[in-house]
Amino acid sequence: MSNKPLSVAVIGAGMAGRSHAAGYRNVNTVFGAGLPPVRLAAIADANVALGEDAARRYGFERALPSWEAVVEDPSIDAVSIVVGNDLHRPIAEALVAAGKHVLCEKPLAGSVEDARAMAELERNADVVTAVGYTFRRSPAIAGIREHVRAGELGDLTLFSGRYWADYATNPAGPLTWRFKGGPGSGALGDVGSHIIDAAEYVAGPIASVSGASLSTQITKRPVPLGAVVGHNAAPVSDEFGEVENEDTASFTARFESGLVGTFSVTRTGFGMPNGLAFDVVGVGGRAAFDQHRPAEYLFDDAQPEARTRGARQVVAGPALPYFAGGVPMEAPGVGVANGDSFTYQARAFLDQVAGVAEPLPECATFADALRTMEIIRAVVESSRRDGAAVHVPTFS
């Protein structure tokens, strides 16, 4: 490992781009020494004012007007791609060709075909390629995974997962890129990809899906008059356009282990700002997580005294993954949240890039993210076939 500074850039200055930027800014404050110094080189966005504001806020040296400018800068080593899904493939291909390491936001691409091409790109690349599944960095979720892997829940019988969000409940909300694309690119691709990945991270691979249903509650939205940042409100015209993808979806899954799973996702769930949650149940115990209470989880097992059995709150502390060394005050009850997950993810990515001696667990790969998209595609196919079971193909 070299002590030469790692030069990083972020393509996209919206809300997720800023989360990546903040993560890079904080990587050398967590988990001790070992990572080389990090140079915050650039944030690129076609909305120049937005890019300049993000660069100023997060301490990056400059703002660039295009992703091509990042590709062309030989001093930049590693890049986060945080823009519209359809742009992921061409940007990733150009960055890899330029010898740069890539951390791409989920979902991996705008189509399964593009995602397959990116997985092939990864297979032949001599740089690190990774995908941003930040919930893998949750101490609580990682702790539940450890319970499952240690057999503390016994044979699993049910996984029930949801991601209910409310960012699309307002019918006056502008028709942004998130509402374009075919079935599967709406709530399934945006928030569903996270709960699907979390399910496989905790409970193992999904073999097939069935019983799928997709629906759109708000079928038309006003066309924005200018750029829209994240889920924010924006000036709109009198013209309305068609929403092309789903607001809500539900399906069941069969895991390779035989485990049964149920899933529901929505972006029109009133009062649910960021509601990823799941229960995993076995013959000997159960565990539950809710992102609205991110610094804890519930755990229940067969305690010796039957009178006092029941779910108990496990508060995040140094005994859980990522907590020790990952927060300034290493004591249970001080909390851990979304921003911390982006810091841990950025650190894990740069650990891979730098080849540190004791790295964090590696990030999800392009191949992992392709698998998520294949599951989403199978869900869409099941909905088209009146809920019929659809096998999830394996990338090889």
Image (cartoon, helix red, strand yellow):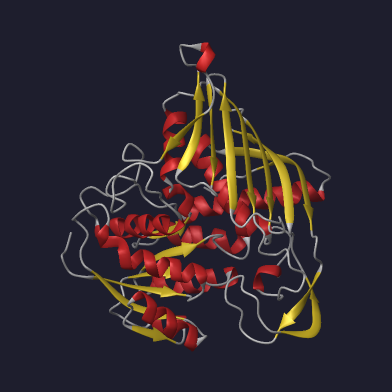
- The image quadrant that residue 58 belongs to is bottom left
Q: Can residue 92 be seen in this view?
A: no
Q: Which residue is at the front of the view, 111 or 262?
A: 262
Q: Which residue is at the front of the view, 363 or 94?
A: 363
Q: Can residue 103 be seen in this view?
A: yes
- The image quadrant that residue 54 belongs to is bottom left
Count of numbered tags: 0
Q: Which residue is at the front of the view, 13 or 256?
A: 13
Residue at (67% x, 59% y) in the render: 166
Residue 378, given in percent of the width and then of the height, sits at 69, 48
Residue at (46% x, 58% y) in the render: 131
Residue 20, given in percent of the width and then of the height, sits at 42, 66
Image quadrant for the N terminus? bottom left
Residue at (46% x, 11% y) in the render: 304
Q: Going by the image, does 40 lie left or right of 154?
A: left
- The image quadrant that residue 210 belongs to is top right
